[in-house]
Image (cartoon, rainbow, N blue to C red):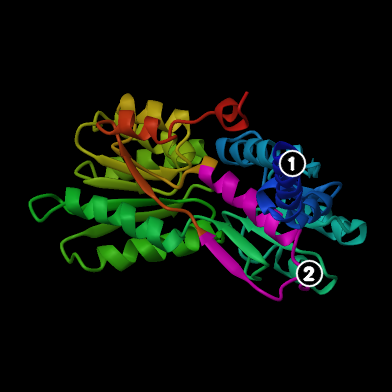
Amino acid sequence: MRKLINKLALTVVATILTCVSPTFAQDKGLPDPRHDKYVDTMKGKKVVYIPIGMGYDLSEGWWAGLKRELLPLGIELEIRDPNWSVDAGVRTLTSLIGERPDLIMVQSPDEQSYSRVLRKAEKEGLHVVQIQMHSSHSSDIFVGADWIQVGEEVAKLAAKQCGPDSSGKVAIMQGVLTASASIFQVRGVYNILDQHPHIQVVSNQAADWDASKARAIMETVVQQHPDLCAAIGFWDTMDVGTSAAIKEAGLKDDIFVVTSGGGHKDACDNLENGTFDVAISYDVPRQALELANAARALLQVESKAGAFKYSHYSPLTIMTKENLNVQRRNGACWTKESVSGN
């Protein structure tokens, strides 16, 4: 009889514990309302990506990263490539105002060309992320390099190389003069060079992001100033031409070449083979992740377009031939395939 009473008592206790203990109640977990809302919000949303043109390292890297991060969420990604045509870019943005995607991600070729249509998109309620080079109209989020900081960093390196015992002559190779990457970067350069009275800027010209133009400009510069101390370039792809002119003049060992870019494998190869002495990287794989995070955030917010405006500036890394192995371990020297995960 006593055994039967004990057995009944244990059964009652076990039943009570099953009912009241959260441990037992959660054996199969609990639904997360945030998860369900997040998944439902992302699925089926349409994001349109508009670079200034495909086929170069930055735009290909951003696109590869966006696909890797956003496609698994069920987001529809579409690319509209204006192929370096400002008019085509304006027409695309104008068309999208009517099509009303959930988000536009756009790289502006200069400060003014897209500003009016981006302002109109905002008034029509379209969220916009601007990439790397922004327009004069600020949109919801900007992701890209802090061009003032990039200019200051390349100038510090040139100033260190061209001390009072050198000629002090420096040449600056800009991209498109009206692009934010040129306008603000050159300000950063002069923020530093103006602190060094012995330095003389003997050339400050625009090569329009074109390696051939950069080469032609630098050929003339080194003819006029064979004692040039340093060449500051605004994009590594363009500055392959800058360096080629210096090498052709037989001055590769005498002129310090410093440039900047996204940290692509080509830049690393050009550090190894001596084309560049230093390259400042703004880390395109990381930028792609920040772009994807910006998209995820804007697709969830319920505030109107332009209500809040943020900038996400990319950290900079100084890359040299000597530290390449370290930088590779940190994700530098990437390719489109490595960013996409294929």
Q: Is residue 209 visible?
A: no
Tag 2, which secondary structure?
A: loop
Q: Which residue is mark 1?
A: 28
User: On the image, which quarter does residue 106 sit in?
Assistant: bottom right
- Relative image position of residue 116 (x, y in whole percent): 75, 70
**Residue 245, percent from left and from top:** 36, 33
Could you say which quadrant of the image residue 329 lies in? top left
Badge 1 crowding class, 10 Å Cα cut-off, few under 14, some 14 to 19, many 20 or more, is few
Please give the label number shown on residue 302. Answer: 2
Q: Amino acid at mark 1?
A: Lys
Residue 277 falls within the magenta-colored stretch: no
Q: Position of residue 228 (x, y in %)?
A: 23, 45
Q: Amino acid at mark 2?
A: Glu
Q: Earlier along the polypeptide chain: callout 1 or callout 2?
A: 1
Helix, strand or loop status at disc 1: loop
Q: Would you say residue 311 sits in the magenta stretch?
A: yes
The quadrant the N terminus occupies is top right
Residue 264 image offset from top left, x and y in percent: 48, 34
Which residues are the magenta region?
Answer: 286-312
Foreground residue among 174 and 156: 156
Please tell me which residue lies in front, 332 or 74: 74
Pick the quarter of the image with the C terminus. Answer: top right
